[in-house]
Structure formats: C-alpha cells, structure tokens
Image (cartoon, helix red, strand yellow):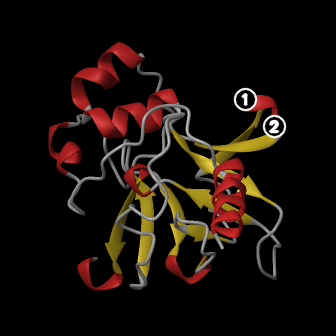
Amino acid sequence: MKCLTFIILLIILQACPQKFQPVKTVPMENKEAKNNPYYSRTDTSKLDIPNEEWKKILAPDLYAISREAATERAFTGKYNEFDEIGDYYCAVCGNHLFRSTSKFSSSCGWPSFFEADKKGVYYKRDTAYGMERVEVLCKRCDSHLGHVFDDGPKPTGLRYCMNSVSLEFIGDSEK
C-alpha cells in the first residue's frame, strides 16, 4: 500500500512539479486589486510592467507564482474544489481567462478547465525539469497561470491545470 501511495504521489508531482517552496494560499477576496493601478476587468490593453514594480504591488505568494512561475501545493488552492457559476480573471491584472462552465474535477490537485478564453491566454514551451510542457500565461500582463496538458475531457481534450492564487473568481450574482 505504501508503494502504491508513493507511485501516485510521484505521478502527481511529475504532472505539475514545483519550482519553489509550496506557496500558502490567500483568502478569496483579491486585496491586491485595490492597491494595483494596473488591475482592470474591462481594459484589455497589453501591460509592460517590470517585475520590480509588480513586486511592490503584489502579495508575496501571488508574485512568486505569477512572476517567477512558482506553484501552489496540490489540493490547497481556494478554487480546487469550487463550483460556483461565474468567470475567472487574472488575479494580477483582471484579464478574463475562463468561464466556470469549462471547469471540471480532474483530481490533480489544482483547478482544471477544458477551455480558456482565446483572447485571455497565450502559450509558451516549458522544458524545465527535463520535461516537455506548455505553460499558460495571461495575454495582458504575461503572468504565469499554470500549464495545459492533453489529457482533459471532451470536447477539447485539454486540461488547463491552474494555480488558484493566479485566479480571481467573480460570480454571476456579483456582476
């Protein structure tokens, strides 16, 4: 039994490895948005802000994940087991990323989606740790969100494995 548990843990860690120490998650309210002059859920213009500026504005955990590509610990994110109806935005800049109707329970330990807003994200090859992966970044502010894998459900067959810290949820009832 211990051997099986170890193998499962090893598979999970290989799917979404951590670059840094695990990051402690924050409450659901995006407090950074209140002190962030670049945050907007309506402005889609490209941002070119140096990391030194982001470091002054963002909470340490959000900075580590969004600007340094760190990863929150599996099964600790605020949106991992979350199923309300609404939209997910970039916690750094407010750019629209996902609709809740594309979220599914993947059991990988991070919130997963089968489809992203094509205007909200872009992709970059990631060869860290000797693996071939595809990194998902915010199209507006270039923040790291997570990775996309080809083992998701229909209709796309994709699994966007995202960090909760990188996301902000706004329910339909709040709009």
121 sits left or right of 145 in the view: right
Percent x, y of residue 132: 84, 39
Mark 2 element type: loop
Residue type, label 1: Ala
Q: Position of residue 23 (x, y in %)?
A: 36, 43
Visible in this render: residue 38? no
Residue 54 in the image: above or below residue 135: above
Query: What residue lies at 21% left-to-right and 59% top-to-bottom?
Result: 27
Q: Is residue 106 above or below residue 162?
A: below
Residue 131 image label = 2
Q: Residue at x 36, y 55 (%)?
A: 41
Q: Which residue is mark 1?
A: 128
Depth check, front residue: 72 or 95: 72
Residue 167 in view (yes/no): yes
The numbered dot on residue 137 is none
Q: Are marks 1 and 2 in contact (CB under 8 Å)?
A: yes
Residue 107 occupies which quadrant of the picture?
Answer: bottom right
Q: Quadrant of residue 63?
A: top left
- Mark 2 burial class by Cα count in 10 Å: few <14, some 14-19, many 20+: few
Quarter of the image containing the C terminus? bottom left
Q: Amino acid at mark 2?
A: Met
Question: Does 2 sit above or below residue 15?
Answer: below
Which element carries disc 1, helix, strand or loop?
helix
Report the quarter where the N terminus lies. bottom right
C-alpha gap between disc 1 and disc 2: 6 Å
User: Residue at the location (63% across, 75% down)?
Assistant: 106
